[in-house]
C-alpha cells in the first residue's frame, strides 16, 4: 500500500525527515534535481459519486523527454501515502528522494533516456493536487469534510486530462504498485485505446473483507479523535494526530510480512534488559510503530487518508459485471505485466493470480511474475534483481 | 533454416517435431517453457501466439527478455488458471519426468488444450538398459544427472507411457522417436533416446 520509509530503512537510510548520516542518496543513474509542476483544469470533473469537482489541480513531475512521435510516455501512479515525487531530489530539499528512485532514471529499469516518465499525484491528495485542504471556490474556505469522495476511476479521468494537457494521446505504459496498480488496471478499462502496456504490481482486483476491515479501523481511529471535528479541523487549528498515528500504525503492520518484521525487530527490547512492567515502550517494534505514526501524523492529512481508504474499498471493476472480472476486462486492449510477491499477505499473490486468470479468460496478453521476496506488501519498492530485471526487460521490449 | 533455429534444434531436437505439429496461428501453452525459446520460435515461424508456464525466476526473466508471454506458476499446483479448451495445443516438453503429480497434470493437459504434445527421455533406450545391467544408474545426453542431483522423479519408457495414456483414455495421434537428432523407426523403445507424442482425447476410432 505504502511507499514506505521502512523500505528505505532496510536499505540503510530514511525516506523523510531531518538530514542524517543515513540521508537518502540518489542511486547511480539518478535523474538528479527535479521540480514539481502543477496543471490547472477549469472544466468541471464529474465524479463517480455524482458530485462534481468544479475545478482542480494535479501535481506532477516529469523525467526524460517526450519523443517526436509522442510514443514514449510512461505514467507512474502512486499508492496510499506517496506522491508525484517518483525520482530524483529537490534543489531546496536534497534529502527528499523520490519514492521509486531505484526504478526510474537514466539506465535504470524504467530508463528515462528512452522513456518520458510522468509521476502523477491524485486528486484528494495532500501533496499538491486539489484535496480536502484546498480552498473550496464556493466558500473561500478549505473544503475539509465537504471535499467529495474520489475513486480510482475519478483519478484516472483526471490523469487523462493531464495526459491531454501534455500532448500524450497514448501511453506506452502505465505502472503502479498497490493502489497505484489499481490505477494502471483502471487505465486499461477507462481508456483502452490510450494505453499500450499496463504494469500491475502487488495488486488486487478488489479489497477483501479483511482489507476493508483494516481500513475501517484506521478510519475509526481518525474520526473518533476529539480533534477531528467532523473533518473541519483546519479552521480549529488542530490536527487529529492521535487518530492518524494509530491509522498509520495499523496500516504499517499490514504492509510488512511477519518474517520481515521479526527479522528487523525480533523481540529486542528498547534500552532495557528486561520487561518494564508498565506501559512504556518495551520492544523495538513498539518504538518503531510510534515513530512511524508520529512522523506520518506530522505530514499527512486525515481527510485525505479517509478518502483514500474509501477509494480502495470501493474499487471493484467486476462489480458491474456480476463479479465476472474477465467480462470486465474484455474491453482492455493493453498488454499486461502482473507482478506479485509471495510474502505479501495484504494483497496476496492469489489476488494477482485472479487478475491473470481473468485476463487469460478474456484472451488478453499477459505475463505474470510471482517474486519470492520476504518483505511483504512493500516488496514492490525494493530493488530485487529478479523483479527489476523483469521490469528492465519488459520496458526494453516496448516499441517506441 | 536460420542460425537461431539450428541452434535451438541442436540443443533440443524434440522441438523440431513439436514445431511441425503446431498449426500456424494456433494458441499454444508451453508448460515448463524454460527461457521461452520454443515459444519465440513458434511465434516467429508459425505466428502461433503462446503462453509459457515456468517456475524458475531466472528463466521467467529470460522469457520476458525474449518477449514471450510467461506465467510464473508451479505446475504441481495444477492448471486451474486455465479454462477448458482455452488452447489449441498444450506442450509439455522434457518436463513430465520432473513432475510429481503426473496423472493429475496429464488429465489437465487435455482439459485445457484440444491437443497435447508431450516429450520425454526414453528410459528404455539401450544405453540406459546397459548401464543398469552393469549396475549403474543411467547417465546420458538426455539424462545428464547423477542419481543424487537429478530433478527427475518419474522416468518411463515408451511402453510405459503408452500404457499410461491408455489408462487415462488419451489417444496417441502421432509419435516421433529420436536419437541424436534423427528419427528412429526400428525398435524405437530400444534405439530411441527421446520420444515426442501428439495426444488427443478419447479412445482410438
Image (spheres, rainbow, N blue to C red):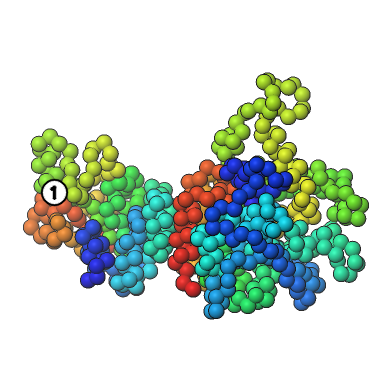
In the picture, residue A43 is in which quadrant? bottom right
Q: Where does label 1 land, which residue?
A: B125
Side (left or right) of A251 relative to A385: right
Q: Position of residue A174 (x, y in %)?
A: 57, 66
Question: Relative to B185, is A265 above or below?
Answer: above
Q: Position of residue A243 (x, y in %)?
A: 79, 44
Residues packed near mark 1 inside 10 Å, few (<14), some (14 to 19) or many (20 plus): many
The answer to whether residue B88 is seen in the rendering is no
B104, B157: nearer the viewer: B157
Question: Relative to B93, is B89 above or below?
Answer: below
In the picture, residue A160 is in which quadrant? bottom right
Residue sitting at 54 percent across and 72 percent down? A72
Residue sitting at 89 percent across and 63 percent down? A141
The answer to whether residue B193 is seen in the rendering is yes
* Total numbered labels placed on residues in the image: 1
A347, B202: nearer the viewer: A347
Side (left or right) of B155 relative to A264: left
Residue sitting at 38 percent across and 47 percent down? B76
Residue sitting at 22 percent across and 45 percent down? B144
Q: Position of residue B22 (x, y in %)?
A: 28, 68
In the picture, residue A156 is in which quadrant? bottom right
Q: Position of residue A134 (x, y in %)?
A: 82, 63
A231, B81: nearer the viewer: A231
Question: Relative to A372, is B33 above or below?
Answer: below
Amino acid at each position: 500500500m505504502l511507499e514506505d520509509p521502512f523500505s528505505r530503512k532496510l536499505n540503510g537510510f530514511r525516506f523523510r525527515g531531518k538530514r542524517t548520516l543515513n540521508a537518502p542518496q540518489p542511486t547511480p543513474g539518478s535523474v538528479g534535481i527535479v521540480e514539481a509542476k502543477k496543471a490547472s483544469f477549469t472544466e468541471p470533473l464529474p465524479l463517480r459519486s455524482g458530485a462534481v469537482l468544479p475545478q482542480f489541480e494535479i501535481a506532477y513531475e516529469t523525467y526524460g523527454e517526450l519523443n517526436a512521435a509522442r510514443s514514449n510516455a510512461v505514467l507512474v501512479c502512486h499508492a496510499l501515502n506517496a506522491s508525484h515525487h517518483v525520482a530524483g531530489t529537490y534543489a531546496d530539499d536534497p534529502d527528499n528522494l523520490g519514492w521509486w528512485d531505484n526504478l526510474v532514471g537514466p539506465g535504470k529499469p524504467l530508463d528515462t533516456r528512452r522513456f518520458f516518465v510522468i509521476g502523477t499525484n491524485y486528486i484528494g491528495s495532500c501533496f499538491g493536487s486539489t484535496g480536502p485542504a484546498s480552498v473550496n471556490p464556493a466558500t473561500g474556505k478549505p473544503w475539509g469534510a465537504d471535499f467529495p469522495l474520489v475513486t480510482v476511476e475519478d483519478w484516472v479521468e483526471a490523469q487523462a486530462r493531464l495526459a491531454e494537457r501534455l500532448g500524450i494521446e497514448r501511453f506506452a505504459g502505465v505502472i503502479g504498485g498497490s493502489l497505484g496498480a489499481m490505477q494502471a488496471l483502471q487505465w486499461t478499462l477507462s481508456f483502452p485505446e490510450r494505453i499500450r502496456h499496463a504494469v500491475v504490481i502487488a495488486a488486487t482486483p478488489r479489497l477483501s473483507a479483511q482489507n476493508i476491515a483494516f481500513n475501517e479501523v484506521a478510519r475509526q481511529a481518525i474520526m473518533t479523535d476529539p480533534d477531528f471535528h467532523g473533518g473541519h479541523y483546519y479552521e480549529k487549528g488542530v490536527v487529529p494526530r492521535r487518530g492518524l498515528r494509530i491509522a498509520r500504525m495499523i496500516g504499517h503492520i499490514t504492509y510488512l510480512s511477519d518474517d520481515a518484521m521479526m527479522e528487523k525487530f525480533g523481540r529486542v527490547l528498547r534500552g532495557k534488559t528486561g520487561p518494564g512492567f508498565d506501559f512504556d515502550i518495551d520492544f523495538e517494534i513498539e518504538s518503531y510503530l510510534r515513530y512511524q505514526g508520529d512522523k506520518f501524523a506530522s505530514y499527512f492529512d486525515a481527510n485525505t487518508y479517509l478518502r483514500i481508504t474509501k477509494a480502495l474499498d470501493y474499487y471493484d471493476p467486476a462489480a458491474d459485471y456480476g463479479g465476472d472480472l474477465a467480462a470486465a476486462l474484455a474491453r482492455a486492449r493493453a498488454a499486461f505485466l502482473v507482478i506479485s510477491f509471495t510474502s505479501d499477505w495484504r494483497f496476496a499473490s492469489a489476488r494477482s493470480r485472479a487478475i491473470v486468470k481473468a485476463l487469460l479468460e478474456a484472451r488478453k496478453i499477459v505475463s505474470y511474475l510471482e517474486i519470492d521476496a520476504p518483505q511483504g506488501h512493500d516488496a514492490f519498492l525494493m530493488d530485487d534483481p529478479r523483479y527489476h530485471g523483469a521490469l528492465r526487460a519488459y520496458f526494453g521490449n516496448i516499441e517506441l | 533454416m536460420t542460425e537461431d533455429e539450428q541452434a535451438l534444434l541442436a540443443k533440443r531436437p524434440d522441438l523440431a517435431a513439436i514445431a511441425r505439429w503446431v498449426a500456424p496461428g494456433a494458441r499454444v501453452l508451453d508448460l515448463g517453457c524454460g527461457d521461452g525459446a520454443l515459444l519465440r520460435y513458434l511465434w516467429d515461424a508459425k505466428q502461433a501466439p503462446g503462453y509459457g508456464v515456468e517456475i524458475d525466476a531466472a528463466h521467467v526473466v529470460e522469457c520476458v527478455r525474449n518477449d514471450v508471454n510467461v506465467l510464473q506458476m508451479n505446475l504441481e499446483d495444477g492448471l486451474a488458471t486455465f479454462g477448458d479448451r482455452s488452447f489449441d495445443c498444450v506442450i509439455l516438453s522434457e518436463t513430465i519426468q520432473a513432475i510429481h503429480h503426473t496423472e493429475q497434470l496429464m488429465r489437465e493437459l487435455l482439459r485445457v488444450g484440444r491437443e497435447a504434445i508431450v516429450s520425454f527421455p526414453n528410459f528404455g533406450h539401450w544405453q540406459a538398459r546397459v548401464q543398469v545391467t552393469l549396475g549403474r544408474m543411467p547417465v546420458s545426453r538426455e539424462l545428464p544427472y547423477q542419481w543424487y542431483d537429478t530433478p527427475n522423479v518419474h522416468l518411463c519408457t515408451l511402453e510405459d507411457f503408452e500404457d499410461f495414456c491408455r489408462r487415462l483414455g488419451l489417444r496417441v495421434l502421432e509419435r516421433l522417436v529420436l536419437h541424436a537428432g534423427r528419427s528412429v523407426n526400428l525398435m524405437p523403445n530400444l534405439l530411441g533416446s527421446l520420444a515426442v507424442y501428439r495426444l488427443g482425447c478419447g479412445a482410438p476410432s
